[in-house]
Image (tube, rainbow, N blue to C red):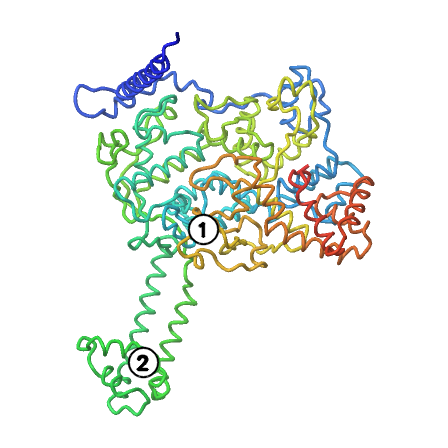
Amino acid sequence: MRSTRQPEDKFGMRIRLLLLGLVLFVSSLAAEEPKPASGPPSAADYDAFVQPSDRDHWSFKTVVRPPIPKVTDATWVRNPIDAFVLAKLEGHQWRPNPAAGAPQLLRRMYLDVIGLPPNLEEQSLGGAGGDVGERFDQLVDQLLSRPEYGERWGRHWLDLVRYAETNGYERDGTKPNVWRYRDYVIQSLNQDKPYDRFILEQLAGDELPDASSETVIATGYYRLGPWDDEPADPKEDRYEQLEDMVNTTSQVFLGMTLACARCHNHKFEPYSTLDYYRMAAIFNTLQRPQAGRADLGSPAGNREQLAREAARDQAIQERQREIDQRRTAFQTTFLTEYPGKLPADAVTAFRTAPDKRNDAQKKLVQQHQAALDLEVTAELPEATRGEIREFERQQQDLRAATPDLPRGYFFTEPRPNPPVTNVLLRGKATAPGTVAEPGLPTVLVAKQPPFPASKGPTSQRRLILANWIANRENPLTARVIVNRVWQFHFGEGLVRTPSDYGVMGSSPTHPELLGWLADWFVNEGGWSLKKLHRLILTSNAYRMSKAWNAEYGAKDPTNERLWRMPYRRLDVEPLCDAMLVATGRLNREMGGPSMYPFVPRQALEGHSDPNAIWKPFDEKDASRRTVYAFIKRSMVVPLLEVLDLCDTTRSAAQRNVTSVAPQALAMLNGDFVNRQSQHLAARVEREAGADRRAQIVLAWRLTLCREPTEREVAAMLQFLQEAQQPPIDAHQALVQMCRALFNLNEFAYAD
């Protein structure tokens, strides 16, 4: 007979095993940190955690440029990238995929570089004669010179630096003027600002010798993360903000998961807790401009510019005091024998000294001040008017001579003497340990550099960090950025953990190619991202087709050997922008405050004030490129969210690519797609006339950038005929066809 207690015994054993595992886990935590004889661990105890052998990891070694490999089929090699790719394939007796067709490559290149498909005139390049390779080389230069390049690739950078326009948390307040940082990124990429300079400006733009409004706005990078404007524990919250800066900086620029060492030495990597707090000490100098819970912007300029603006404002205020004195003096005279239309009790209130007025009189003054001002202005003596006009002219001259500085969103460093930073035991602000002096990750430096006391207005700590990161000898900086550029072109990086180059990260699939690119980028490319793009885009490796090879796919399904170009669904921004291009309604206005896409009323109703949370819909403004969409952390535009916009609370090295039912609902039934379907149908009727075949051909070219096949034309003619049944007229049938085109996989994939 089976015992009824057996299941209970097994359950009890599971509980005991779980408890035992918990005890062992807690014991392991207790054993993580160095155990000095007494007191908290010292700096030497923490530094002992990193061993000399840890520096042997491939990514911590100095970049060494390898020789370009010899290959059998030298005719396939257009530049050194091809040699490295082909050498690996030939090592397995494989061949790279043939080149993509010209129309496919054309659309791929446009969407990749500028995030927009080619228009009707530009599509002719795909079918032109002559040397295809040379023709597309020229196209690369043209696309990289277009302002749309910065808008497309700027969005990639904004993903990395956790860009959003609100603070998150309960109130989710708007970050004032934060859009200027977005515009800074786009403009920097379009100017081909050298990447080392790009680093310096964002990490220490206010500490540079040639600091300017632009470089100060760049430091808004630090302030982009979420912020709780009413934290339960302000001291703990301060370290949460520092963690956001340490985590983002270490991942974005260095590919290091340094934030994992906040509470204890890293479990898997040679990063000590002291390494974490050394970095935090560099950022602990920064202060948030705020007034209570209100988040404030600041004038963006160097010290001299700020001083000039302050002196100008003081001079303007002095003139204003002169104006106010003259008006007040005349008002007193005017009220002595008041001939005006104000009620008697109001006149009495005005005649009473401000500090002697009762509450009722204060209210009367507030109610009638505007009316009295009009009367006083009308009765001013001409001599007084002349004096006031002169002071106002002087104010205008002062403003013209020293225009207002742009207001940006960034931290400030109000004093050169930084606060003391301690290692926090278990990461708790209430448990300070040894003092953490500013420093760099131990595994990357033979000796900590000096951080001398500053004689200037700031500590200069961030400038020391920025110069080290942007140094050509840094083993990680160039490797990380060239891999990111490669990743955004090919879908996967040569290192497939683009923000983790540590022991737990992936090893490069082509280590020699990564090393060669990193060295070339710094020493030949001059840190130019556009030159790096051109090198990649002109290679045969980039121009391969996406055709599947069953034999290769069985052995290398993730394409680590780079035998084909992978399929990649468009990000939500180029997907939406491509619809606007097809309809002809894309608003190409660049920069400035963000636009507000349409949000269904139902999505706003859950908020305490649905009328204030989102600005009224303006279709012309909302038809700007999607990179300019307002990103609210507590309510991302539903279409952007469902189509996999990145997580805005942390650095996002790669976007998720999901396939879920709400995407189909948004693309078939959503307001944006249906509105664009109406606009596309109207454009097709306007430009192709009433001929159904001509309408189909034009719609195909506008959406898919190619001519339809005869089979597709026949199918669409039949569809339009069957769909045109009362109450659906010819126009509505065409709208349904346009909506179907927007929902094709071919539209959602570059080629």
Q: Nearer the viewer, residue 729 or 487?
A: 729
Quadrant location, the N terminus: top left
Q: Amino acid at mark 2?
A: His
Q: Residues within 10 Å of mark 2 (few under 14, many from 20)?
A: some
User: Which residue is pictured at 74% across the width and 52% down the height?
Assistant: 734
Q: Is residue 655 left or right of residue 411?
A: right
Q: Going by the image, does 320 lie left or right of 128?
A: left
Above or below, comparing residue 77 to residue 188 in the picture: above
| 272 in relation to 4, above or below | below
Residue at 52% in and 26% down: 495
Pointer 1 residue: 214
> Residue 542, relative to residue 174: is it above or below?
above
Give the crowd class for mark 1: few <14, some 14-19, many >=20 residues within 10 Å: many
Quadrant into which the C terminus falls:
top right
Where residue 43 appears, as percent x and y from the top left, is 25, 26
Percent position of residue 246, x then y: 37, 36
Question: Disc 1 residue type?
Answer: Glu
Q: Position of residue 503 (x, y in %)?
A: 43, 21
| Residue at the front extreme of this rendering | 1
**Element at badge 1?**
helix
Of circles 1 and 2, the one toward us is 2
Query: With 668 as the anchor, is 708 left or right in this view?
Result: right
Looking at the image, is mark 1 or mark 2 earlier in the sequence? 1
Quadrant assignment, res 434: top left
Residue on which the image places disc 2: 368
Tally of numbered discs: 2
Circle 2 sits in a helix, a strand or a loop, which is it?
A: helix
Q: Residue at point 53% right, 59% down?
A: 617
Q: Position of residue 357 (x, y in %)?
A: 19, 77
